[in-house]
Amino acid sequence: MADGGVHFDPEVTVPNPARVYDYWLGGSSNFAVDRELGDRMIAIDSRVVPMVRENRHFLRRVVTWLCRNGVTQFLDLGSGIPTVGNVHEVAARVTPEAKVAYVDSEPVAVAYSARILEGNQNATITHADLRDAETVLSAPTVAGLLDFSRPVAVLALSVLQYFGDLENPAAMLDRYRKVLVPGSYFAISHISADDSDVDMDGLADATKQATVSAHPRTRAEVTALFGDAQLVPPGLVWVGGWHAEPGSAEPVPGILGGLGRVG
Ligand SMILES: C[S@@+](CC[C@H](N)C(=O)[O-])C[C@H]1O[C@@H](n2cnc3c(N)ncnc32)[C@H](O)[C@@H]1O
């Protein structure tokens, strides 16, 4: 059982990225198998923990930046297990009427999201595979909440790495791109071994024991995922360095992030 009154099959024997990630972030929606893999990965390169924390801070800065720039609708693909500073909470601080459609394929993430969103008119969770854009976009929880005749920000943070090249994540995003009007955005973060001494190959190798394994990409490959969207300055950088507060510590390498505007 994961805590918090949400009950699941206790016979969880395979670690899952959503729950490993929750463990690293200090959450309690994870099982022993997830913690074991999480600890093995920390032993490979302990920077994995600050890396994912910086990814969450990146998410908050991106959402705040978007709201301040007039974008108030969000489609969060692979949204994960709710943790401190979820998209709808961050957005509502700037724009109380902001709309957020979360999408995830992992039952624990979906159950917790449903629980915290109960009674919320401005945010929904959809249990779906993001690879099936048509199903996601036509779900009443997405189509009934977001107005695609106005700009929408599609968030794909730390999720496209779970798709190998054969699955063609750029083509996956393109199916979402087709329904976006100019002034919409893609926010993407992705693990990368480029320009750093992080043992990303070792970390990625360890994920082969999980339900899905991770595939690091080069800077050029991550840039290509933005398609024709124009990167907002400072471009594609280590997530901790994207619009960092003055005086922030040097960003931890390992996850590249950026925000692209659809023209
Ligand atoms: C590492 S977590 C990232 C969570 C969040 N986006 C963040 O950056 O904090 C990756 C999430 O993607 C979800 N995911 C993986 N493959 C997916 C798919 N095919 N469809 C929907 N969600 C998926 C996992 O269940 C997990 O919750």
Image (tube, rainbow, N blue to C red):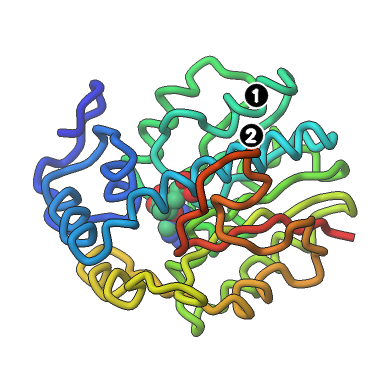
| Mark 1 neighbour density, 10 Å: few (under 14) some (14–19) many (20 or more) | some
Image disc number at residue 251: none
* Camera-nearest residue between 74 and 125: 74
Pinpoint residue 229: horizontal percent, then vertical percent.
80, 64
Is residue 129 found left or right of 222 in the rendered image? left
Which residue, given by chain and number where applicable, does mark 1 sit on?
Answer: 122
Q: Residue at x 43, y 67 (%)?
A: 162
Cα separation, mark 1 vs mark 2, equals 6 Å
Q: Is residue 105 visible?
A: no
Which residue is drawn at the image coordinates 42% and 44% (left, top)?
Answer: 53
| Quadrant location, the C terminus | bottom right
Measured from the top left, where is residue 10 in percent x and y? 11, 41
Q: Position of residue 141 (x, y in %)?
A: 60, 36
Amino acid carrying mark 1 in the image: Asn
Circle 2: residue type: Val
Work out which residue is located at the far top of the displayed protein and give it.
119
Which mark sits nearer the N-terminus, 1 or 2?
2
The residue at 24%/32% (across/down) is: 28
- Marker count (numbered): 2
Residue occupied by mark 2 = 100
Residue appearing at x 20%, y 37% in the figure: 8
- Asked if residue 67 shows in the view, the reply is yes
Q: 229 or 177, which is in the foreground?
A: 229
Spot the residue most to the bottom: 166
Percent x, y of residue 124: 56, 32
**Mark 2 burial class by Cα count in 10 Å: few <14, some 14-19, many 20+:** many
Q: Is residue 47 left or right of residue 223?
A: left
Q: Secondary structure at mark 2?
A: strand
Q: Secondary structure under badge 1?
A: loop
181 with respect to 2 (left or right): right
Mark 2 vs ligand 1: CB under 8 Å? Answer: no
Q: Left of 254 or right of it: where is 57?
A: right
